Image (cartoon, grey):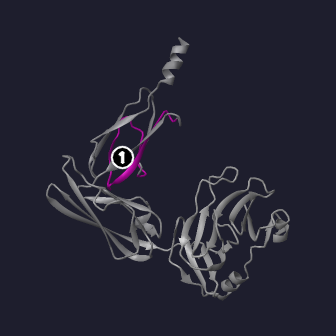
């Protein structure tokens, strides 16, 4: 008998449903507790409101997507959560960045705008998205005529209007939401060409701003003096001469994360500090190797461009990532990462 009781407990179901299935802001929603047992119930509705009723009703004041959680008998392992979308009778859309309405949208960060259209009779809906007030953006969605629009912005602008135009059952409606696009501080790649011209380029994840002239005299001086022939790692100084006793063809190196990245006449390679598990990263003529690895990336220059590679997913120094193009700058002879975010 005890065994049967234990088995029954193991099969306890924690679940709930709600109606209507496409609720609107201001409409009463009935939540039905489908749990097979329990004596106490704790509901959280995702908008700071709660309930201890078994089958509570709820009215959301604003359209949006909320997470509803039911906890039974105050036990963490007896919890279920579901997402509920509250529609507006007037078509609207949400932004995937929750703080966008109050704090704005950072440049170069992917955001998705999602239409919220109350359509209980399943009419055909036609969508058209547009962005007004800036040319500094890139559409990432394959089309601007679906219910979602994915985009990133590349320029800081105080007021950008995102407009959603829909056609529903022959009726056309436009909805505008205004956002502030703001700058963020990040690291820069500083570059010096063979004619001693100095440039910098801010990097944001897998994206980068356009190159700009480097006018800071102290940073110019630091860039011109940069050499990849001396490294201090764990309090010990490593020199190019030290490395050349083991690998005579080495022309420069950098140590990071217990690995040494070095360049030869034939390319860039990586190995453990003791020289084991040597693997190629780039095969070909290398003009310079970055003097540091920042944000887990290695940067280097070839004849007509600057390259980088994220240093992730490695096993015995066999990286799963591949080199990518940062820019098409020609004849970069010196390269340095500005460690101060600007």
Quadrant of residue 203 within the rendered picture: bottom right
Q: Is residue 58 above or below residue 54?
A: below
> Is residue 296 something that shows in the picture?
no
Q: Is residue 176 toward the left or the right of residue 200 in the image? A: left
Assess whether residue 210 is covered by the magenta stretch.
no
Give residue 301's position: percent from left, percent from top.
Answer: 62, 73
Give residue 50's position: percent from left, percent from top.
Answer: 42, 45
Q: Is residue 286 toward the left or the right of residue 212 in the image? A: right
Q: Is residue 54 toward the left or the right of residue 127 in the image? A: right
Assess whether residue 57 is covered by the magenta stretch.
yes
Quadrant of residue 92 within the rendered picture: bottom left
Residue closest to the eye, 147 or 179: 147
Quadrant of residue 257 within the rendered picture: bottom right
What stretch of residues is rendered in magenta?
47-74
Where is mark 1, residue-wise? 84
Residue occupying image coordinates x 70% and y 83%: 224
**Label 1 crowding class (10 Å Cα cut-off): few <14, some 14-19, many 20+?**
some
Give residue 298's position: percent from left, percent from top.
Answer: 64, 66
Q: Quadrant of the C terminus?
A: bottom right
Residue occupying image coordinates x 53% and y 34%: 77
Residue closest to the eye, 283 or 224: 283
Residue closest to the eye, 168 or 34: 168
């Amino acid at each position: 008998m005890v065994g049967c009781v234990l088995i029954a407990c193991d099969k306890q179901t924690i679940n709930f449903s709600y109606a209507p299935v496409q609720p609107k802001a201001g409409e009463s929603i009935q939540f039905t507790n489908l749990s097979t047992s329990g004596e106490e119930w704790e509901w959280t509705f995702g908008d700071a409101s709660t309930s201890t009723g078994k089958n509570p009703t709820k009215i959301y004041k604003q359209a949006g997507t909320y997470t509803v959680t039911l906890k039974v008998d105050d036990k963490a392992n007896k919890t279920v959560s579901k997402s509920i979308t509250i529609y507006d009778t007037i078509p609207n859309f949400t932004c995937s960045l929750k703080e966008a309405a109050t704090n704005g949208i950072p440049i170069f960060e992917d955001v998705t705008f999602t239409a919220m259209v109350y359509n209980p009779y399943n009419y055909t809906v036609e969508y058209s998205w547009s962005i007004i007030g800036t040319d500094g953006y890139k559409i990432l969605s394959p089309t601007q005529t679906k219910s979602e629009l994915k985009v990133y912005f590349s320029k800081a602008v105080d007021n950008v209007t995102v407009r959603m135009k829909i056609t529903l059952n022959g009726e056309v409606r436009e909805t505008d939401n205004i956002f502030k696009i703001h700058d963020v501080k990040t690291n820069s790649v500083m570059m010096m060409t063979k004619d001693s011209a100095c440039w910098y380029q801010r990097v944001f994840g897998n994206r980068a701003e356009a190159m700009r002239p480097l006018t800071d005299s102290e940073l110019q001086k630091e860039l011109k003096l940069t050499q990849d022939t001396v490294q201090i790692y764990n309090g010990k100084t490593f020199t190019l001469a030290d490395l050349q006793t083991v690998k005579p063809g080495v022309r420069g190196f950098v140590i990071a994360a217990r690995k040494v990245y070095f360049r030869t006449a034939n390319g860039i390679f990586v190995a453990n500090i003791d020289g084991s598990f040597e693997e190629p990263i780039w095969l070909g003529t290398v003009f310079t190797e970055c003097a540091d690895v920042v944000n887990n990336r290695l940067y280097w220059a070839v004849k007509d461009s600057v390259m980088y590679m994220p240093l992730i997913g490695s096993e015995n120094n066999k990286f799963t990532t591949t080199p990518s193009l940062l820019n098409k700058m020609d004849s970069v002879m010196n390269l340095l990462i500005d460690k101060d975010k600007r």
